[in-house]
Amino acid sequence: ADKNKLKYWGMVDMYLGGMEHTTLHLLYSRFWHQFFYDQGLVPTPEPYFSRRGQGIILAADGTKMSKSKGNVVNPTEIINAGYGADALRLAIAFIAPYDQTTPWNPEGVAGTHRFVSRIWTLTQEFLNKESSSDKQANKDLLVAIHQAIHKVSKDLHNMNFNTAVSALMEYVNILYKIKAVDKFSSQEWSQAIQTLLKLIAPYAPHIADELWHQIGQPSSIHLVYWPVHDEKYLLSETLTIVVQINGRVRGQLTVSSGSSQQDIEQLAREDEKIASYLIDGVRKVIFVPNKILNFVV
């Protein structure tokens, strides 16, 4: 191979392979590449930056799927049964961690189909809302939006697809609860729906793109930028500070986010239980922001 082209294309970012063929995958890729490197034929000692092995989906009874056993799951049959491809994709992503072997759950697709239906219904209700979105900012809605972006983005990057889908389900639940109160009157609802569709797009690409066009977006959802969270909406309005005396836990304080060490110390000293340990004086104070206040007596 042309060495200049090898340098241009560089190393593979990630190599994916089934766990049942680990030895062969390593022989095909890493072993041969290292041999070529020893011969001076390739520019790097390793062929890829990282390698991941996915688990195996077994039959529902825990045995390995095999055509000869007749226990394979045909995706086309599930799709044609009325569940659709998106519900099937979500069920596969949600069934277990990516790298674990797990039996197929026939009931899983029905559950993810209901989830897809909730997304469809919520978006249709948003499109048919009667009130205008002109109220002041809804803090709960903004917090839900940015927490969902943060969680799903992190899980997607780490290939934790099942927990990403779980976070999306939680996000949809929160949106329904907020909708029951403000009836789509908050100005952030457009952002909330757009964020939902962007985050679900890798897992349910068909319904995401369809609803994306329905809410008035001209291009495909798969061509838009991934949303970015705002850190300020990830912080809770209150914090729990553990109070220790000589390293032993003696109490807890609930304080406002952003409280200074001086304010937290004052609250601790005013607490009767904690104050009883400080009668003989304090030699040193150790403060771990947002976590621990330790009095050394």
Image (cartoon, rainbow, N blue to C red):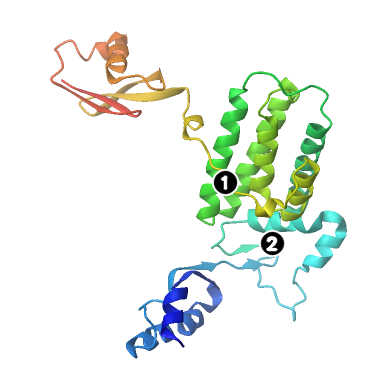
Q: Could you say where residue 166 lies in the image, as x and y percent from the top left?
A: 62, 45
Q: Nearer the viewer, residue 8 or 269?
A: 8
Q: Viewer-nearest of labels 1 and 2?
A: 1
Q: Residue, x 53% and y 50% (percent of image)?
A: 155
- Whether residue 106 is visible here, answered yes or no, is no
Above/below status of 262 relative to 126: above
Q: Residue furthest bottom?
A: 39
**Mark on residue 8?**
none
Q: CA distance from mark 1 to mark 2?
A: 24 Å
Q: Quadrant of residue 189?
A: top right
Q: Residue furthest right?
A: 81
Query: Judging from the image, what secondary structure is the residue with disc 1 in?
Result: helix
Q: Relative to 243, is 212 on the left or the right?
A: right
- Whether residue 46 is visible here, answered yes or no, is yes
Q: Residue, x 56% and y 67% (percent of image)?
A: 54
Q: Quadrant of residue 159?
A: bottom right
Q: Dot 2: within a 10 Å radius of its alpha carbon, few (fewer than 14), some, or many (20 or more) residues? A: many
Q: Nearer the viewer, residue 285 or 236?
A: 236
Q: Relative to 117, is 169 on the left or the right?
A: left
Residue named by callout 1: 152
Q: Could you say where residue 263 lies in the image, as x and y percent from the top left?
A: 31, 14
Above/below status of 5 relative to 202: below
Residue named by callout 2: 104
Query: Judging from the image, what secondary structure is the residue with disc 2 in?
Result: loop
Q: Could you say where residue 97 lies in the image, as x and y percent from the top left?
A: 56, 57
Q: Residue, x 77% and y 59% (percent of image)?
A: 85
Q: Nearer the viewer, residue 176 or 92?
A: 176
Q: Relative to 92, is 122 on the left or the right?
A: right
Q: Could you say where residue 261 lies in the image, as x and y percent from the top left?
A: 28, 20
Amino acid marked by disc 1: Val
Q: Relative to 238, is 147 on the left or the right?
A: right
